[in-house]
Image (tube, coloured by chain):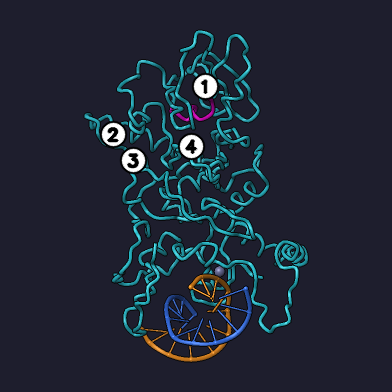
Chain colours: A cyan, B orange, C blue
Amino acid sequence: MERQEPCRKSPTERPVVNGERRAQESRWLGWPEASERVPAPRPLGTVPEQKRPATSAHIPVPRQRKTSDKAHMDEVMAANVLTSLSTSPLVLSPPADITSLDQYSKMWSEGPAALSSCSSSGNWSWDAPSDRSTPSTPSPPLPGDIPKTLLPSAHSDDSVEETETAHFMFEDHPVPRKRKNSVKVMFKCMWKNCEKVLTTSSGIQRHVRTLHLGRNGDSDHSDGEEDFYYTEIDVNVDTLTDGLSSLTPTSPTSTVPPPFPPAEAPKSEQTAVKPEAQLITPLSQSAPTTLCHIRSDHAYQATAPGSIPDPPALHPTGAGFSVSWQPPPVLFRGITLYPPCMAQIRAVGVMEKRLQAQHPTVIKTLTAATLSPKPATGTRKPRGEAKKCRKVYGMENRDMWCTACRWKKACQRFID
DNA sequence: CCTGCCGGGAG
DNA sequence: CTCCCGGCAGG
Ligand SMILES: [Zn+2]
């Protein structure tokens, strides 16, 4: 936990930097040109475990354990994966292709955050201090069978059934399957305003495929994308009450997976994330969404926002999944936020600035009312309030600071 | 202690 | 220019 060490003494020498690791990062921040940064291999006396992510090399692609026997299978799967990825506008772990959000390169680590922020599937439950062992993982959901690879124990083989195994990933879906004699498994379409409920997965798949995805019906070939638009529900034969309950696993907010235009517009992924029927809070909703398109801070900063924390790389101890990182909460505008919310923080910051540019008064008042009731306190240097990048992101995320902050100049992101 | 950042300096 | 840091003022 201690990275601050007084082991820097030679200005001309290789700046050992106060133990702050900082090294190869910056790349993931999507720096346009400054690609030659990446100082030499710093001695680095302290590498507090979870420091830098190993960066780069991490592809946002399903980590397939490769324990399978048939290499061929893998190929097929891979192909399948790629296909569905490129086809599907799902923001879930986009194939490192984004333009302005290059920082997505590190998706794997910020996966959950990214998911909750940019994809409108709002699974904000992640921010909650709650510690439920969420399956959250940037790994892109895949058509039917893939899950087998991802599933913890993976039932050796259930290919006998239809592909509805797909729901693996969603919170708690043990895939009941008529165990209770009074419960019947149904499949409900989750498309925006569609409430279709069918009894078979194939049925619902066809429904989704034809009515929502605009694909040609007949071909029983499902590319798996449908799986994201329907869910299983246990219909209690006696009371037939729930349905909804099973749709809203954890958060009372959003339920719909990924809303977006049908088959069309394959490219403008998050560029087209329309607010639509999201029930998320104004902040969480607007922030990340906007964040996705907003460009740069300004002045010093030339980097595009859109990335989030990036806590520590793979925890040395943790398994392969990035579920655990529980960085220290940050204080923003007097509110305690938990890491995944950094997107919000940043977004808010950016937005504030934009606002300030257009409606100085508005934000002025807003800010004033919120945190700085009195601008002048008698002394010369008002000592700007409002936490700056350093405080907000913390030393370990120094690369997320605005450039000014990194240079120990007046922060350009969180102005007072 | 810690934070924000001015002023100065290196490449 | 870009990038960094000493060091100081204000908490
Ligand atoms: Zn800043």
Q: Residue at x 62, y 52 (%)?
A: A287
Q: Which mark sits nearer the N-terminus, 2 or 4?
A: 2
Which residue in the structure is indicated by mark 1?
A: A232
Type of amino acid at the residue the image marks with label 2: Glu
Q: Earlier in the sequence, mark 2 or mark 1?
A: 2
Between C2 and C7, the residue placed more toward the observer is: C7
The residue drawn where x is 60% and y is 59% is A332
Q: CA distance from mark 2 to mark 3?
A: 14 Å
Query: Distance from label 2 to label 4 (Cα)?
Result: 19 Å
Residue A363 shown left or right of residue A52 in the figure = right
Q: Amino acid at mark 3?
A: Arg
Which chain contains the residue that carries disc 2?
Answer: A
The 10 Å Cα crowd at callout 4, few under 14, some 14 to 19, many 20 or more, is many
Image point (49%, 11%), residue name: A180
Q: Amino acid at mark 1?
A: Glu
Dot 3, crowdedness within 10 Å: few (<14), some or many (≥20)? some
Q: Secondary structure at mark 1?
A: strand
Q: Position of residue A163 (x, y in %)?
A: 41, 22
**Cβ atoms under marks 2 and 3 closer than 8 Å:** no
Quadrant in the rendering for residue A243: top right
Chain of the residue displaying label 4: A
Are the residues under marks 4 and 1 on the same chain?
A: yes
For the N terminus of chain A, give its image quadrant.
bottom left
Label drawn at residue A75: 2
Asked if both marks, 2 and 1, belong to the same chain, the answer given is yes
Kindly state the secondary structure of the residue where label 2 is placed. Answer: helix
Side (left or right) of A276 relative to A270: right
Measured as percent of width and height from the top left, residue A340 is found at 52, 50
Where does the magenta region start and end?
Answer: A223-232
Residue beneath disc 4:
A88
Q: What residue would you read off at disc 3?
A: A63
